[in-house]
Image (cartoon, rainbow, N blue to C red):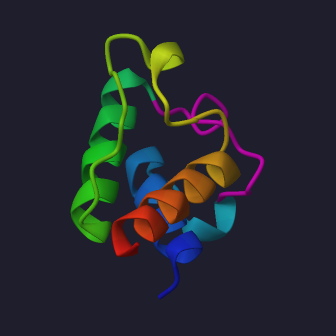
């Protein structure tokens, strides 16, 4: 399973949706993911990819990790994986 598919699977699980219901342009708000669900998604992503996501749950706007859309989350995860391998 590639990074994109795994992130979509995790997001879908938090949103109580099927992965096929998730688009790359979907925002957490579009999917009905609240702040707690977002934090749980971040934890699940960290665990699945063995990475540490620079995310401030108290102030997401100040985080270095863009959570504005599923595509941005995937890009961020891929970047963290690439940095870890370097």
Which secondary structure type mostly characterizes the magenta part of the structure? loop
Vertically, is 12 above or below 84? Answer: above
Toward the front, the furthest residue is 86
Q: Quadrant of residue 38?
A: top left
Q: Quadrant of residue 84?
A: bottom left
Residue 68 within the segment the image draws in magenta: no
Vertically, is 28 above or below 16? Answer: above
Toward the bottom, the furthest residue is 1
Q: 28 left or right of 41?
A: right
Vertically, is 32 above or below 73? Answer: above
Pick whichever, 47 or 17, lies toward us. Answer: 47
Q: Residue at x 52, y 56 (%)?
A: 17
Q: Residue at x 44, y 51 (%)?
A: 16
Vertically, is 59 above or below 54? Answer: above
Pick whichever, 53 or 29, lies toward us. Answer: 53
Find the magenta span and give its range: 22-33
Could you tell me residue 81's position as x and y percent?
42, 67
Could you tell me residue 72's position as x and y percent?
65, 47
Q: 85 left or right of 44?
A: right
Q: Residue at x 50, y 36 (%)?
A: 65
Quadrant of the image containing the C terminus: bottom left
Toward the top, the furthest residue is 59
Q: Residue at x 32, y 21 (%)?
A: 57
How many numbered tags mark residues here?
Answer: 0
Q: 5 left or right of 50?
A: right
Pick whichever, 34 or 5, lies toward us. Answer: 5
Could you tell me residue 6's position as x and y percent?
46, 72
């Amino acid at each position: 399973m590639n990074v994109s598919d795994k992130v979509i699977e995790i997001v879908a699980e938090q949103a109580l949706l099927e992965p096929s219901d998730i688009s790359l342009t979907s925002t957490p708000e579009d999917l009905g993911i609240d702040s707690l669900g977002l934090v749980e998604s971040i934890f699940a992503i960290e665990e699945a990819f063995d990475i540490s996501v620079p995310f401030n749950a108290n102030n997401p706007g100040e985080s270095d990790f863009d959570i504005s859309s599923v595509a941005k989350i995937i890009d961020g995860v891929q970047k963290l994986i690439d940095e870890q391998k370097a």
